[in-house]
């Protein structure tokens, strides 16, 4: 397949951990795939956005697409870089895009890939998505003496004061204005990033700590997160032979920046007795490196001379140039690192690691098993651990011999095995993309109009609007708002627009009782006028006229009458559908079906009658008996959906809330299907069951992995205010899918063909709302 990697730098120009990992992965993939890399450089003597092509110096099979970004690197979006990326996509036509980092590039690159329906995999290396600075460290802490203080979480105003104050004017009287400006900037950035994460098919976390932090602190859905440690070219890590004749030597590998904690390492080394050496490898970082060298020179006489600064090494030569010359590696980072490459590399070379007792560092080093842990940010604790190895070199050899803890052999993951896992992930996201793809019709074949959402004669416990648990009706009354009623002229205009583009059915309000809509009979006339069918959802009370009279009006123009039904007993039905009368509802169904059957026998239209359920803990045990009742009454179909948990009060009613509830649901499904198979409707037909299928144990998050949306590209919804909506999800949730336009201002077909709607069609499969949707059905052969 064709794989396009995105990374904010590529070796040797940029040689930190995420860049090195990306190069290693590219080398591993290049044996069986066409691999390209989209990355950056900073040439101040060339224009921003200038593209050029190159090849990996170590593996010419890998094509580099390099964009110049010397001046705009602190932005999170860049239209010129977006355009260069779009050109690469059009030329290359990749099968999958794999992101390593977007910093110094443009977050909108993912929009370019997603709108082309290219699956996106994203490896998390730090906190940049949930922290604008990437490392949860403060440049301007409350205590000015606590340089590079740790941050306990992202907040817009805190970010402005503690990190972006360097952009303030400096005038005291303008400070609040500056805080407001940058807090707004950070807020816009964070909202944008949350939207961008919805376009990603799968996030890979190389440490369980990072996996859990993104899930718990940022809210990434667990179903979109997978733990997978890095893979390594183990061949280049073989053959370590310690050079003889040297004292015990500590090594540091990395950049010369404050977050890496070299300043703490140097000062801790100054407190270690004996004659150890400290070798520091890494690319100089301007005055930071000079300051660190001055710090080393200020150590006590006899100690300063034992600190050695060594030039940057080539990754493939790390054993010869680094590991053969040290006895232990120190990772002193003051930021909470996740899965440092150097820890893994040292473990493969069977060297002990001293590192902090937090994050992914502590995940891969266990104290006194394969290394030593010191108290994070404590120089005294770090010096103590270093002293232990100087005093007991045999301990260092014993700890180093254990290697990588997750594998009994001590070997770190091989790049060959890692590539196979990455390939499996690529195939999985491609499979889900293909199974979830929807075709867009010329126009919607069915349109639902929310004609009268505020008008109903029942208070069903699960109803978004009318449940006694719902705050919406009370809020509307408090605000003095009148009940929402859709103008009949809007319905006429939309139907006229859509009929010539394939419209076959319309549904009046499914939120509220449509038979209470003052223009309902005008809708019946509209169906007759345009030769389309009505699809009716009613609560089964048949208000105003009664079941028989409504049946005579409705049956001739209706394809399906869905009657809300939520129990096989009076107690259950009336406890769920507050205000319902069991006997009257039973009588109403019998009367309606009698009229329907008589009309059909006389050669007229035979509309389908459906019982429509919400699957609840309160009625799941009665599901088989509901099927029996439906068969007895002559109902053609039983359809349902799982609960939208609008309110905390009904959360325990969800059959998807945990594995135990799912098991109860699955038992009820089997029993219901047996009833449907064993019993026949009058006339010898079997009753139809819709959406009554067993759930996977992972259905707490994703009901139907890879399942396509049943509505996008096929149906449309119009709110009482005229807003175009793409689906039947609860109103607050479906608004998160985008603003597509209002039918008072634009035509239905204009919106249907518009960019906003088409963008949703191509990207919906990864949206949090869509992943958790109760209306999708599973696809066979798609792994959960």
Image: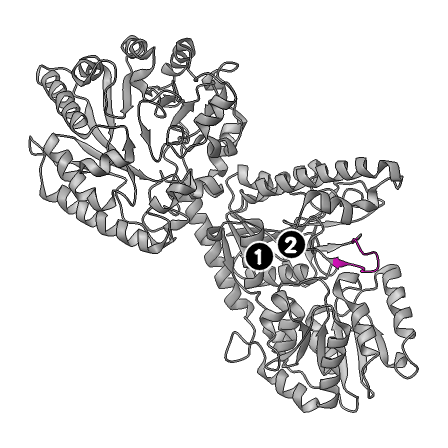
* Residue 609 coordinates in the image, percent (x, y): 19, 27
* Between discs 1 and 2, the one toward the N terminus: 2
599 and 76: which is toward the camera: 599
Residue 312 rendering spot, x and y as whole percentages:
78, 68
Q: How many marks?
A: 2
Q: How dense is the environment of label 2, judged by Cα within 10 Å: few (below 14), some, or many (20 and up)?
A: some
Residue at point 31%, 38% (across, down): 641
Drawn side of residue 94 relative to residue 71, left or right: left
Residue furthest out toward the left: 683
Q: Nearer the viewer, residue 126 or 719?
A: 719
Based on the picture, tell me whether residue 574 belongs to the magenta stretch. no
- In the picture provided, is 93 more to the left or to the right than 503? right
Question: Colour scheme used in the picture?
Answer: one colour
User: Is residue 400 shown left or right of residue 550?
Assistant: right
Which numbered disc, 1 or 2, marks the residue closer to the eye? Answer: 1
Q: Which mark, residue 411?
A: none
Looking at the image, which residue is at 28% across and 32% down?
577
Q: What x and y, as percent, mark residue 729?
A: 41, 33
Q: Quadrant of residue 499?
A: top left
Q: Residues within 10 Å of mark 1 (few under 14, many from 20)?
A: some
Most prominent secondary structure in the magenta stretch? loop
**Residue wearing tag 1:** 213
Q: Kindly indicate whether the residue at mark 2 contacts the one at mark 1 (C-beta within 8 angstroms).
A: yes
- Stretch in magenta: 141-149
State the image quarter where residue 398 is shown: bottom right
Where residue 11 sits: x, y (%)? 71, 60
Placement of 170 over or under 255, stated as above or below? above
Look at the image and tell me whether residue 108 can be seen. no
Q: Is residue 342 above or below residue 599?
A: below
Q: Identify the secondary structure beneath mark 1.
A: helix
Residue picked out by circle 2? 127
Using the image as rendered, state which of residue 205 and residue 442 is in the foreground: 205
């Amino acid at each position: 397949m064709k794989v396009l990697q995105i990374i904010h730098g590529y070796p040797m120009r940029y040689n930190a951990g995420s860049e090195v990992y990306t190069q290693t992965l590219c080398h591993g993939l290049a044996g069986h795939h066409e691999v390209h890399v989209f990355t950056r450089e900073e040439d101040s003597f060339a224009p921003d956005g200038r593209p050029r092509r190159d090849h990996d110096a170590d593996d010419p099979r890998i094509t580099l697409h390099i964009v110049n970004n010397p001046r705009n690197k602190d932005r999170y979006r860049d239209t010129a870089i977006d355009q260069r990326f779009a050109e690469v996509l059009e030329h290359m036509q990749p099968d999958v895009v794999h992101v390593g980092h977007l910093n110094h590039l443009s977050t909108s690159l993912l929009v370019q890939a997603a709108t082309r329906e290219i699956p996106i995999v994203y490896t998390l290396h730090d906190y940049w998505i949930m922290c604008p600075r990437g490392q949860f460290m403060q440049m301007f802490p409350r205590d000015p003496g606590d340089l590079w203080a740790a941050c306990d979480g992202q907040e817009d105003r805190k970010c402005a004061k503690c990190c972006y104050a360097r952009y303030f004017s400096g005038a005291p009287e303008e400070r609040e204005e500056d805080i407001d400006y940058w807090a707004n900037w950070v807020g816009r950035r964070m909202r944008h990033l949350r939207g961008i994460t919805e376009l990603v098919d799968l996030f890979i976390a190389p440490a369980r700590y990072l996996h859990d932090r993104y899930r718990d602190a940022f809210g990434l859905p667990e179903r979109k997160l997978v733990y997978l440690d890095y893979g390594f070219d183990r061949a280049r890590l073989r053959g370590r032979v310690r050079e003889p004749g040297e004292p015990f030597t500590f090594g540091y590998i990395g950049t010369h920046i404050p977050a890496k904690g070299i300043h703490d390492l140097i000062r801790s080394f100054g407190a270690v007795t004996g004659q150890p050496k400290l070798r520091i490898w890494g690319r100089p970082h301007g005055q930071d490196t000079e300051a660190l060298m001055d710090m080393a020179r200020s150590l006590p006489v006899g100690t300063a001379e034992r600190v050695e600064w060594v030039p940057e090494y080539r990754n493939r030569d790390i054993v010869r140039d680094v590991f053969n010359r040290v006895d232990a590696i120190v990772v002193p980072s003051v930021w909470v690192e996740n899965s440092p490459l150097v820890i893994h590399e040292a473990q493969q070379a069977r060297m002990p690691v001293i590192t902090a007792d937090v994050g992914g560092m502590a995940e891969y080093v266990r104290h006194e098993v394969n290394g030593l842990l010191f108290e994070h940010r404590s120089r005294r604790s770090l010096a103590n651990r270093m002293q232990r190895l100087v005093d007991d070199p045999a301990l260092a050899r014993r700890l180093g011999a254990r290697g990588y803890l997750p594998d009994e052999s001590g070997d770190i993951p091989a790049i060959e095995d890692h590539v196979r896992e990455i390939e499996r992930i690529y195939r999985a996201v491609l499979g889900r993309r293909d199974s979830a793809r929807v075709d867009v019709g010329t126009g919607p074949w069915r349109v639902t109009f929310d004609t009268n959402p505020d008008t109903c004669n029942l208070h069903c416990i699960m109803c978004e609007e009318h449940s006694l648990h719902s705050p919406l009706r009370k809020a509307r009354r408090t605000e003095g708002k009148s009940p929402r009623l859709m103008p009949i002229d809007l319905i006429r205009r939309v139907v006229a627009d859509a009929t010539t583009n394939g419209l076959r059915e319309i549904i009046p309000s499914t939120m509220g009782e449509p038979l209470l809509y003052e223009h309902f009979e005008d809708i019946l006339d509209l169906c007759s006028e345009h030769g389309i069918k009505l699809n009716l959802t009613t609560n089964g009370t048949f208000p105003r006229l009664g079941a028989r009279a409504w049946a005579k009006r409705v049956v001739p123009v209706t394809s399906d009458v869905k009657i809300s039904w939520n129990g096989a007993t009076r107690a259950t039905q009336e406890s769920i559908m507050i205000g319902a009368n069991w006997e009257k509802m039973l009588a109403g169904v019998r009367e309606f079906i009698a009229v329907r059957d008589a009309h059909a026998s006389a050669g007229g239209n035979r509309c389908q009658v459906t019982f429509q359920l919400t699957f609840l803990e309160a009625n799941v045990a009665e599901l088989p008996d509901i099927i029996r009742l439906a068969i007895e009454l002559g109902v053609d179909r039983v359809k349902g959906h799982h609960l939208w948990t609008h309110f905390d009060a009904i959360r325990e009613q969800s059959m998807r809330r945990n594995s135990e509830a799912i098991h109860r649901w699955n038992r009820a499904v089997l029993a219901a299907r047996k009833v449907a198979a064993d019993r026949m409707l009058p006339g010898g037909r079997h009753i139809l069951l819709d959406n009554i299928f067993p759930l996977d144990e992972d259905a707490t998050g994703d009901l139907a992995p890879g399942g396509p949306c049943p509505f996008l590209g096929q149906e449309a919804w119009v709110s009482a205010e005229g807003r175009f909506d793409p689906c039947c999800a609860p109103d607050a949730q479906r608004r998160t899918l985008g603003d597509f336009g209002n039918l008072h201002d634009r035509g239905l077909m204009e919106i249907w063909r518009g960019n906003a709607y088409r963008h949703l069609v191509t990207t919906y499969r990864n949206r949090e709302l869509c992943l958790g949707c109760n209306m999708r059905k599973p696809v066979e052969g798609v792994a959960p």
